[in-house]
């Protein structure tokens, strides 16, 4: 039964754009769902590095921005939209390898600090390279096409992200990354190439987040460094994954939905107030349930079944 | 301007900036040294202290330097409180727990600033702001005064760490927590005070910075990164190391600003930060060690 | 099989290991003993590739592994345990062995489940194979580390104080385990403070004091020599 839930959910999501106009608020929900799906895919991909490998990255905004701009440029030169995602993903993976190779030797807080530097430097460079990125004014995408392209690409990306996460976790790559998370020195003592494995994780994660960026550009018809390279994009991924549950199958996705809900709910009556709520959630998670909402839910279920007995 | 005059102004303004940067970095270094925690709420403390100085200035006409007499002790209390309510519970956990917890605290801090002061830029108008002194190049009096206070803060921190019981205890815990505990020092109590002092130092720097820059809720983020850069440059070994790191960054930024333009000025700290982290992969030596 | 030529490690002015030379033959069990701070663990670290030597050469199976990284050394066929246990705390015993088999020595008949289950049986971990390391006793963790090193397919195993902190009963089990490892055809080098265990296991004893070799030979001979007694036993 529980194995059917993801499939049913996927069918329901695939039908949403067609059902949208028929249900009240459906069109709005469909538009919102694009963002939600991109969040889910990105947070799941971020968790390969942040959760599975245990290296918290603040710099994934760089990948999102690279993907968004790659799509914006290539669409401008006449590429069909879905094909533009691939070069973006590849370029982001290469960029990840470029800074990941040296930075992933750092552990814990020092890796995190380095990624803050990388993310911010990338944003600044994008802002400065006006000829390429349009600077602070950004670029506008002038393409038409089917109105639900972004939606279905986002849904497809979610499937890709889950499949990737599942495959990595059951491969020897995932096993090796778990060893690295637990103890780097012990991991090298059993022959694990610590640097290369971590770079692989970062590259895979970068590729998915870049594709999300590309779909986002198509969705908004507009890219600007202050948005797509924004530091807050990287932070959002950390919040989703940690609040939902690090290194778990569903945690990042659930965290992404919670994040989207808060973002939408709070934006209306408490503008600028969402930061503090995320902060409080993060504090609560770190103090009471470092494994996130998923672990909390599991505990609740345990208590419920114990009470029923 | 001639080349030598340009160079002179780079050196003068670089050193003046470096002094303030040093004051900004001590708090982070002290907290890391004593409890091996990277305080991601550091930027929020800088920012909130700057706002406090702004508020006291607009409401009561207090000079920020006078206001610091109020702000610094209160920040000490807030730091102690943060430690005993939150940080204590994750201090022995995995490093990620304290990092993310304090990041959460920083987000709450930023939000408080948005709620009270909105996202608009604020600045403090000082009567002596426009006065300059001729040191070969005209130097604003404000910058000299701030530099003087930053140096005074450095001297006070040195005296505290070397000549008071609590300060010496902090150095002992930083060097070897187990031995310090065996010698009868409570690492927990020392950590609480170190967190308080670290927060107070950050607040003091925030007050100084409020006199130099436009204040907004995002004001702390960029400065926090610069703080990391200084700590990484200086190696967290000592006050001297941090001072050296801060002067290096101050000079590099000023030079980049003069010769390359403001855009480069912002990039310098990131490039230095990532470059040094990467070329010194063994991690960072601790504050006060050796 | 393993050849150490003048292996030296200096930390600033401090010499931790001072010109150690030795040849260790295959299928032999060698014990390295010496007082605390004699440089035993540093020497192990250098053989395992975790610590770069300041001077000297380390040759393993005709390869100069002096500058190799720890993961390369492992893949070349040297497995190790740690003085303070370092299992992958959140992972199950079985996953430890799967990972070691997947990434370890290429020469090993890798990840064959019969090989892994033999190792589990040899190390007496059958009852805890599906438990995460966090829930194991110290003795279990020590056995887990030996199992992990074996699962890499290592031909030579470095055991760093495998018996420290164990009860007499657990120590006896550990001795039997090491005998089993030797019987399985692996070369064992061990650092040990438990002298009865050294007598029972070692074919050869090397004594380190202040970084240098002060005795090398048959256990009975070495353990009764006057210099060793003076340096090590304080007699």
Image: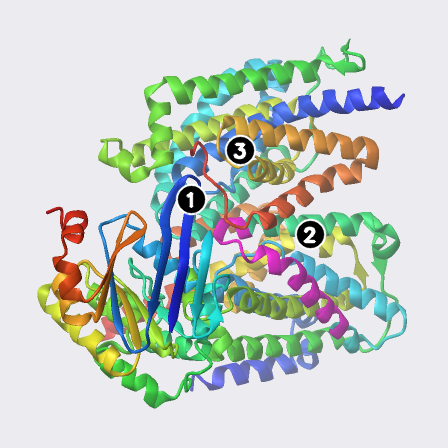
For image coordinates 45% across by 71% down, the residue present is A191
Nearer to me, B179 or B130: B179
Which of pointers 2 and 1 indicates the residue nearer the eye?
1
Q: Give the residue at mark 2.
A: A230
Q: Is residue B155 above or below residue B172?
A: above
Expressed as whole percent of the image width and height from the top left, the position of residue B39 reads 49, 40
Q: Chain of mark 3?
A: B
Expressed as whole percent of the image width and height from the top left, the position of residue C179 reads 20, 77
For image coordinates 9% across by 68% down, the residue present is C169
The magenta segment: A86-111
Q: Is residue B19 above or below residue A264?
A: above
Which quadrant of the figure contains the N terminus of chain C?
bottom left
Q: Is residue C75 among the parts visible in the rendering?
A: yes
- Total marks drawn? 3
Q: Is residue A53 above or below residue A116?
A: below
For image coordinates 13% across by 65% down, the residue present is C220
Q: Are marks 2 and 1 in contact (CB under 8 Å)?
A: no
Q: Give the residue at mark 3.
A: B45
Q: Residues within 10 Å of mark 2 (few under 14, many from 20)?
A: many
Res C134 → quadrant? bottom left
**Relative side of A48 to A120, left or right:** left
Q: Which of the labelled discs sits on residue A89, or is there none?
A: none
Query: For the residues marked 2 and 3, what is the alpha-carbon distance in whole angstroms?
Result: 22 Å
Q: Residues within 10 Å of mark 3 (few under 14, many from 20)?
A: many
What scheme was used to colour the molecule? rainbow
Expressed as whole percent of the image width and height from the top left, the position of residue C126 reads 23, 81
**Relative side of C150 to C205, left or right:** right
Q: Chain of mark 2?
A: A
Q: Which of the labelled discs sits on residue C11, or is there none?
A: 1
Res B116 → quadrant? top right
Q: Secondary structure beneath disc 1?
A: strand
């Amino acid at each position: 039964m529980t194995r059917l839930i993801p499939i049913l959910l996927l069918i329901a999501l695939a039908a949403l754009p067609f059902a949208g106009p028929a249900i009240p608020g459906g069109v709005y929900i469909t538009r919102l769902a694009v963002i939600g799906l991109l969040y889910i895919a990105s947070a799941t991909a971020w968790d390969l590095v942040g959760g599975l490998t245990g290296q918290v990255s603040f710099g994934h905004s760089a990948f999102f921005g690279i993907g968004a701009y790659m799509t914006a440029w290539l669409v401008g030169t006449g590429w069909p939209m879905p094909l533009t995602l691939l070069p973006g993903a590849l370029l982001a993976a290469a960029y990840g390898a470029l800074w990941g190779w040296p930075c992933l030797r750092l552990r814990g807080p020092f890796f995190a600090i380095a990624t803050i530097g990388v993310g911010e430097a990338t944003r600044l460079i994008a802002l400065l390279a006006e000829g390429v990125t349009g600077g602070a004014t950004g670029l506008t995408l002038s393409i038409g096409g089917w109105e639900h392209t972004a939606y279905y690409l986002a849904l497809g990306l979610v499937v890709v992200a889950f499949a990737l996460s599942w495959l990595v976790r059951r491969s020897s790559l995932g096993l090796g990354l778990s060893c690295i998370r637990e103890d780097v020195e012990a991991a090298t003592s059993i022959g694990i190439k610590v640097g290369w494995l971590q770079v692989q994780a970062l590259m895979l994660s970068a590729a998915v987040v870049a594709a999300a960026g590309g779909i986002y550009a198509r969705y908004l018809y507009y890219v600007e460094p202050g948005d797509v390279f924004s530091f807050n994009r990287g932070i959002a991924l950390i919040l989703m994954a940690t609040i939902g549950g690090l290194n778990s199958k569903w945690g990042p996705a659930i965290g992404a939905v919670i994040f989207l809900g808060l973002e939408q709910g709070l934006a209306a009556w408490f503008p600028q107030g969402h930061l503090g709520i995320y902060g409080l959630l993060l504090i609560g998670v770190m103090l009471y349930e470092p494994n996130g909402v998923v672990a909390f839910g599991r505990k609740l279920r345990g208590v419920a079944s114990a009470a029923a007995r | 301007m001639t080349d030598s005059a340009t160079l002179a102004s780079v050196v003068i303004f670089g050193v003046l900036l470096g002094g303030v940067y040093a004051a900004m970095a001590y708090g982070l270094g002290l907290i890391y040294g004593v409890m091996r925690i990277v305080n991601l709420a550091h930027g929020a403390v800088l920012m909130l202290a700057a706002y406090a100085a702004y508020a006291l200035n607009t409401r009561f006409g207090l000079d920020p330097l006078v206001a610091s007499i109020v702000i610094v002790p209160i920040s000490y209390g807030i730091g102690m409180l943060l430690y005993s309510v939150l940080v204590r519970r994750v201090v022995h956990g995995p490093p990620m727990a304290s990092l993310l917890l304090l990041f959460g605290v920083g987000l709450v801090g930023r939000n408080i600033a948005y709620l009270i002061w909105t996202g608009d830029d604020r600045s403090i108008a000082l009567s002596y702001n426009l006065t300059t002194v001729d040191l070969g190049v005209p130097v604003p009096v404000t910058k000299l005064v701030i530099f003087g206070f930053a140096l005074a803060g450095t001297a006070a921190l040195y005296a505290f760490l070397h000549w008071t019981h609590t300060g010496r205890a902090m150095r002992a815990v930083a060097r070897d927590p187990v031995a310090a505990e065996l010698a009868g020092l409570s690492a927990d109590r020392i950590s609480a005070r170190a967190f308080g002092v670290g927060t107070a130092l950050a607040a003091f720097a925030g007050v100084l910075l409020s006199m130099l820059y436009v204040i907004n809720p995002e004001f702390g983020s960029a400065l926090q990164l610069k703080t990391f850069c200084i700590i990484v440059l200086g190696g967290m070994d000592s006050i001297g190391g941090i001072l050296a790191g801060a002067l290096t960054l101050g000079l590099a930024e000023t030079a980049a600003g003069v010769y390359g333009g403001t855009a480069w000025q912002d990039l310098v700290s990131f490039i230095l930060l990532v470059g040094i982290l990467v070329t010194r992969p063994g991690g960072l030596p601790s504050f006060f060690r050796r | 099989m393993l050849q150490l030529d003048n292996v030296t490690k200096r930390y600033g002015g401090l010499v931790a290991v001072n010109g150690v030379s030795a040849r260790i033959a295959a299928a032999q069990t060698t014990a390295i003993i010496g007082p605390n701070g004699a440089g035993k663990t540093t020497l192990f670290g250098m053989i395992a590739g975790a610590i770069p030597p300041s001077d000297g050469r380390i040759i393993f199976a005709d390869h100069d592994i002096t500058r190799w990284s720890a993961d390369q050394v492992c893949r070349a066929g040297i497995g190790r345990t740690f003085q303070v246990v370092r299992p992958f705390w959140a992972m199950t015993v079985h996953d430890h062995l799967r990972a070691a088999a997947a990434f370890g020595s290429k020469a090993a008949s890798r990840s064959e489940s019969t090989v892994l289950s033999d190792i589990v049986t040899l190390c007496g971990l059958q009852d805890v194979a599906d438990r995460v390391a966090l829930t194991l006793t110290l003795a279990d963790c020590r056995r887990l580390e030996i199992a992990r090193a074996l699962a890499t397919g290592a031909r030579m195993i470095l055991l760093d104080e495998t018996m420290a902190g164990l009860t007499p009963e657990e120590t006896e089990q550990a001795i039997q385990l090491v005998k089993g490892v030797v019987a399985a055809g692996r070369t064992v080098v061990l650092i040990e403070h438990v002298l009865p265990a050294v007598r029972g296991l070692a074919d050869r004893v090397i004594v380190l004091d202040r970084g240098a070799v002060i005795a090398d030979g048959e256990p009975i001979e070495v353990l009764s020599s006057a210099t060793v007694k003076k340096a090590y036993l304080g007699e």
